[in-house]
Image (cartoon, rainbow, N blue to C red):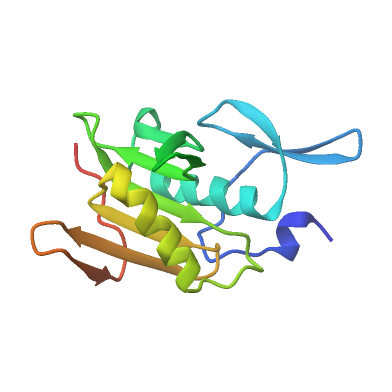
């Protein structure tokens, strides 16, 4: 049984390069342009990026993965950010491994990151369950969505 068969995700199937090197499964990250150790959370992150590129038509050049942000005095790393053409954060995504249940702590985590990033749209996923939100900063509330909107330049 292959790794990706064990973790069948709720994304369309994508042709993602995988290789075995010295008994380590590696997956190619087309954004960071490097081979990474294939762990469950990375599998979700790579598939989510393909979803953004193929289904939501996000240009690769506007996607950032695992960059550091400063939250209060702590250094944290977001999973995925999509920028608009002006360089503003448009979508913030938090990825978890498929065996991790999406619970309140995950929503709290992305909400804290968004205090810094101020993204208009949020997505939380474990590859199986996806949750989408639109932020309304003026009214200080969120709207649940069925999906992310298609990217518009």
**Residue in the picture at 27% in, 48% down:** 119
Say how many tags the image has.
Answer: 0
- Front-lying residue, 84 or 89: 89
**Residue in the picture at 54% in, 32% down:** 30
**Residue in the picture at 54% in, 28% down:** 32
Quarter of the image for the N terminus: give it: bottom right
Is residue 56 at least partly visible in the picture?
no
Quarter of the image for the C terminus: give it: top left
Give residue 45's position: percent from left, percent from top: 55, 49
Give residue 33's position: percent from left, percent from top: 57, 25
**Residue in the picture at 69% in, 63% down:** 7
Q: Quadrant of residue 82?
A: top left
- Front-lying residue, 48 or 77: 77
Q: Quadrant of residue 140?
A: bottom left
Give residue 73's position: percent from left, percent from top: 44, 39
Q: Residue reaching furthest left?
A: 138
- Front-lying residue, 8 or 119: 119
Give residue 133's position: percent from left, percent from top: 29, 64
Picture layout, residue 143 above or below residue 2: below
Picture layout, residue 43 above or below residue 11: above
Q: Quadrant of residue 64?
A: top left
Q: Residue reaching furthest right?
A: 22
Left or right: where does residue 97 sit relative to residue 57? right
Is residue 122 at least partly visible in the picture?
yes
Left or right: where does residue 44 sit relative to residue 124? right
């Amino acid at each position: 049984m292959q790794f990706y068969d064990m973790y069948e995700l709720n994304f369309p199937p994508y042709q993602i390069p995988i290789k075995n090197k010295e008994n380590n499964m590696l997956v190619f990250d087309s954004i960071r342009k490097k081979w990474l150790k294939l762990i469950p959370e990375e599998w979700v992150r790579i598939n989510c990026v393909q979803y953004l590129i193929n289904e939501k038509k996000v240009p690769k050049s506007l996607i950032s993965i695992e960059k550091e942000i400063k939250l209060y005095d702590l250094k944290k790393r977001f999973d995925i950010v999509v920028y608009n053409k002006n360089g503003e954060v448009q979508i913030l995504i938090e990825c978890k491994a498929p065996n991790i249940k999406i619970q309140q702590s995950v929503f709290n985590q992305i909400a804290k990151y968004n205090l810094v990033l101020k993204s208009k749209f949020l997505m939380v996923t474990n590859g199986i369950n996806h949750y989408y939100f639109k932020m309304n900063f003026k009214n200080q509330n969120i709207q649940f969505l069925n999906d992310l909107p298609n990217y518009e330049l």
